[in-house]
Image (cartoon, rainbow, N blue to C red):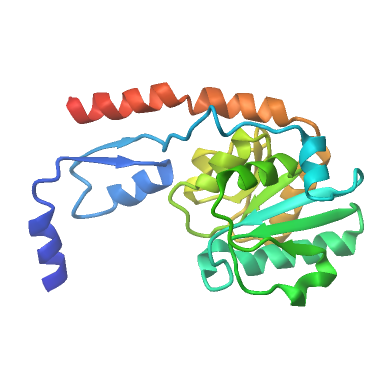
Amino acid sequence: RYIWNLKKNNFTNVKKIICTSEWMYNKVKLSKLFKDKEIKVIPLPIDQNFWKPVDKKLTKDFFNIKDNEKIIVYGADNFIKNKRKGFEIFIEAIKRLKNKNSFNFRVITFGETKSLSNYEYLKIENLGYINDEYTKKLIYSAADVTVIPSNIEAFGLVAQEATHCGSPCVVFNNTGLTSIIENKKNGYIANYNSTEDLTNGIIWCLEKMNNKNEIISNYVKIKFNTDKIIKSYLDFLSS
């Protein structure tokens, strides 16, 4: 009760709240502290001049990827320890995909410094922690699908960056990621925490969104136009 009163007193002067996704907006509206504030959903902008597709053949050559290999990307900071990033359910989905034997695939992960040698049989190559954005852009551009199975996510910059680079994304419903991904337009929205539907989403993207990098990139460039987003921030804060 003491902490709640402390928050209440400190947040008295807060008049406006910006939420980056509909999921976050719905959470804020449930808050006794914030529900009566002026609230608006405005996504996070990214540099659209930088985040754009790189030629797929060039990127596959860079990572020594064979022409017939499908690339599945998963990236999150410290994803083994950070359970909300959904690494375990991702591994289960990859096992299902391997058992189906429908694709010659390879998995590229990044954001984790610990060894993933236990998963070598699943064709997982971990690139570790990457702090250079150009390498990330090459990874997303090489990806045939990017999987983001977070069970809690307020927005999701990985999805924002990946789709701008032309990679479809598979995400879970009931997360902030659904403000970025529209089902079967720039990715697939799987039933919440369903390994089976996550696998279905990966397969759907590999089959249906092949060679649609430019379409996906152009779609999100319009949806998340940087100039319009910045204007929305300025208009809301100055009103």
Give residue 123's position: percent from left, percent from top: 82, 64
- Report the number of numbered marks: 0
**Going by the image, does 208 lie left or right of 163?**
right
Give residue 103's position: percent from left, percent from top: 89, 52
Query: Foreground: 213 or 54?
Result: 54
Give residue 22's position: percent from left, percent from top: 41, 41
Q: Name the quarter where the C terminus is drawn.
A: top left
Residue at 58% across, 71% down: 80
Q: Quadrant of residue 211?
A: top right
**Going by the image, does 131 lie left or right of 65?**
left
Does the rendering let one see residue 1?
no
Q: Quadrant of residue 141?
A: top right
**Going by the image, does 193 lie left or right of 199?**
left
Residue at 42% across, 47% down: 23
Does the rendering let one see residue 130?
yes
**Going by the image, does 40 lie left or right of 97?**
left
Query: Foreground: 66 or 25?
Result: 66
Give residue 89's position: percent from left, percent from top: 66, 66
Q: Quadrant of residue 109?
A: bottom right
Q: Name the quarter where the N terminus is drawn.
A: bottom left
Q: Is 87 drawn above or below residue 135 in the view shown?
A: below
Residue at 49% across, 51% down: 175
